[in-house]
Image (spheres, grey):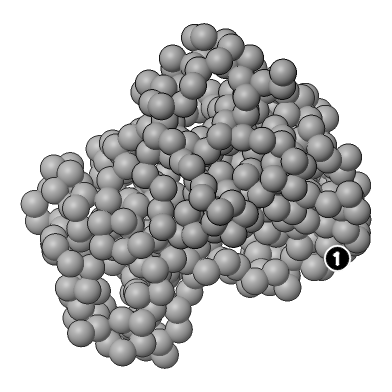
Amino acid sequence: MAPTTVILGLGKTGLSAAHYLSAKGVPFIMADDGPTEDALRRLRQWYKDPVVLPLYQIPVQPGAIWIVSPGVSLAHPAIAKARARGVKLTNDLMLFAEETDGAVVGVTGTNGKTTVTSMAGYLAQRQLSNIAIGGNIGTPCLDILDPATRLYLLELSSYQLELADGLPLRVAALLNLSPDHLDRYVSTEAYYEAKGRIFQAADACVVAKKLQAFAESHGAKSVTVFSDSKPESPEEFGLQYSKGELCLVRGDEVLLEVRALSSQGKSYYLNVLAALAIGVCLDLDLAQMVDDVKNFKGLPHRCQRIDRGDQVIWINDSKATNTGATRAAVEGFLAQGPMILLLGGLSKGADFEVLCDYLTGIKGIKAILLYGEARAEIERHLAPASFESFEKFDRMIERALKLVEPGDVVLLSPACASQDQFSDYEARGRHFESLLTRGAA
């Protein structure tokens, strides 16, 4: 008798796995502690009366295969019990890896994953055919599985990598690491360990230079590094001034002045360097990539400039949902003018002390405005005279519009999730733009 197959979690990934197994004729059990009506509606397209069990009711059988969705924590008591009784845990990523013959690039890191995956995919598409982009970026990997595809570029979250045992990657990229998702992981180290699993079976690796030792200790080989400084070897990517202009460089070769790029800020420059390094590992032509990357448009809500015609640099970085992303954004825009920094939202168990200590020492920040559920946590680490606090997002933006002067930088880089007042970071970013368009209510 074939082992029982169970899908845990019926979000986008779980539904993708259900569709995949249905197409292959594999019977399975579905489990979710709170399936949405939309998920049930989709299931009814395949089954007349879909049965969805709560996790604690799943029959635990040694040798059974449980396909765990990213949104389901491995610490769930039902999963811990099943593991102890010999149940095999896997996920959609490993099912995908077993099925495809195409080369796979995996991109992870605390910040910048979506931009680098999209950018590397764009550069590859300019030189190769049959390219697919997916994973955590929005389209589950099983949904893009196609025998004709030669190259897949996948954004990979720590949740996906937790069960990625020996994931065969042509290129594995780790962009950065900073504390995140501490509402799910027992420690920062546990979160980092999940990220490090990306290197276990990769042919080539692209890594931020300061993480090279971490990567190699987790199995990385054939490593290409990038950084924000002058390269120390011909293969290394970095940033360097040439004739008074900050440039992207590889070794001693000047590749491109950063002012030619469509978006600005150090974090964006590092993303470009990572994408170029991935392309080199794929044997893409570097000169063509450098020419093509100038035409890549930055993604919405990621250090995106909003032009109001008021001599103010307004930046929508709503995607910055952790302290590391916010610090990178602040560092990237400080030199462009006095800054009004907009923080807040829903904490993910973050420790704001380190970020606030950093912000406190910066004279270029003229005001810090806070909003939302996490504002009280952030306030504890800021000097009383250095911030203003608001319950509602709209009131914060209204105050920013009154404080701002020509030449200022107003940076929305919240360091928090959005779900206290918005459905997601995209909704928060769109609302920010709409308030600026109409001048705030």
Quadrant in which the C terminus is drawn: bottom left
* Horizontal arrangement in the rendering, residue 312 relative to residue 244 (left or right): left
Q: Residue at x 73, y 73 (%)?
A: 295
Image coords of residue 169 (percent x, y): 78, 34
Image coords of residue 226 (percent x, y): 68, 42
Residue 89: quarter of image: top right
Image coords of residue 279 (percent x, y): 81, 50
Is residue 248 in view?
Answer: no
* Horizontal arrangement in the rendering, residue 280 relative to residue 227 (left or right): right
Relative vertical location of residue 4 with respect to residue 147 in this rendering, above or below: above
Q: Please state which of residues 108 and 279 is positioned toward the viewer in this rendering.
A: 108
Residue 179: quarter of image: top left
Q: Residue at x 20, y 58 (%)?
A: 372
Q: Residue at x 72, y 18 (%)?
A: 1
Relative vertical location of residue 291 with respect to residue 312 in this rendering, above or below: above
Q: Provide the residue designation for mark 1.
A: 126
* Horizontal arrangement in the rendering, residue 438 relative to residue 430 (left or right): left
Q: Secondary structure at mark 1?
A: loop
Q: Residue at x 31, y 39 (%)?
A: 350
Q: Please state which of residues 158 and 328 is positioned toward the viewer in this rendering.
A: 158
Extreme residue toward the front, this view? 48
> Of the residues shown, which amino acid type is indicated by label 1?
Arg
* Horizontal arrangement in the rendering, residue 231 relative to residue 279 (left or right): left
Disc 1 residue crowd, few under 14, some 14–19, many 20+, Cα 10 Å: few
Extreme residue toward the top, this view? 85
Is residue 184 in view?
Answer: yes
